[in-house]
């Protein structure tokens, strides 16, 4: 048996006791909170969903914030990596003979850099 620990769970408000689940259920069907194994834990309960960090579910606003942070971080990394690759590729291109392995490698790096850079900037734009 598993129990929903969320104190504001709609089921708990309705019946005044934690929702109970059997089998392979891992999150509460009423509120989406990750379930706990003992009734004691469930009765003690959690006040907000952010403290249920063990599970994938978070308070909707916290979730949105986290996603936005992730996107920002990813876009920043994309731009940085892209710019570094383009810079490195330019250095290589100047030093390498056209048609050589290094020259082709430099082009590959340049293309990869451009792709990362474009992805970083389009992700940053999508946000605004
Ligand atoms: Zn619940």
Image: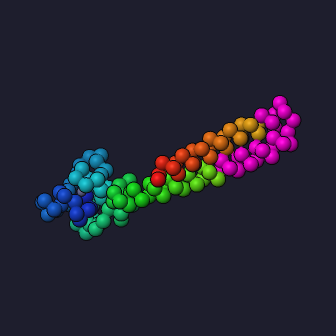
Q: Where is residue 119, by image quadrant?
A: top right
Residue 12 versus residue 26: which sits nearer the camera? 12
| Location of ligand 1 given as a quarter of the image | bottom left
Task: Kindly identify the residue that appears in the image at 84 percent across and 33 percent down.
Answer: 98
Residue found at the far left of this picture: 15
94 relative position to 120: left or right: right
Q: Where is residue 18, by image quadrant?
A: bottom left
- Colouring scheme, one of rainbow, by chain, secondary structure, one colour: rainbow
Task: Kindly identify the residue that appears in the image at 24 percent across and 50 percent down.
Answer: 29
Task: Tell me the chief SS of the magenta region.
Answer: helix
Task: Kindly identify the residue that appears in the image at 60 percent across and 49 percent down.
Answer: 78
Residue 42 location, x and y as percent?
A: 25, 63
Residue 30 versus residue 60: which sits nearer the camera? 60
Task: Kindly identify the residue that appears in the image at 62 percent across and 41 percent down.
Answer: 115
Decide if residue 40 is in sight here: no
Residue 40 location, x and y as percent?
A: 25, 66
102 lies above or below 14: above
Decide if residue 9 is in sight here: yes
Decide whether residue 92 is among the magenta residues. yes
Decide whether residue 22 is among the magenta residues. no
Tally the numbered discs. Answer: 0
Residue 16 versus residue 74: which sits nearer the camera? 74
Read off the magenta span: 81-104
Residue 57 location, x and y as percent?
A: 35, 55
Residue found at the far top of this picture: 99
103 relative position to 71: left or right: right
7 relative position to 57: left or right: left
50 relative position to 13: left or right: right
């Amino acid at each position: 048996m598993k129990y929903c620990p969320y104190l504001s769970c709609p089921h708990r408000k309705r019946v005044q006791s934690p929702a109970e689940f059997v089998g392979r259920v891992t999150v509460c069907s009423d509120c989406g909170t990750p379930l706990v194994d003992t009734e004691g834990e469930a009765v003690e309960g959690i006040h907000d969903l952010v403290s249920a960090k063990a599970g994938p579910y978070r308070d909707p606003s916290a979730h949105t914030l986290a996603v936005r942070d992730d996107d920002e971080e990813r876009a920043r990394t994309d731009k940085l990596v892209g710019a570094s690759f383009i810079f490195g590729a330019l250095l290589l291109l100047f030093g390498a003979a056209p048609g050589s392995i290094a020259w082709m490698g430099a082009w590959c790096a340049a293309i990869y850099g451009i792709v990362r850079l474009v992805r970083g900037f389009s992700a940053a734009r999508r946000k605004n």
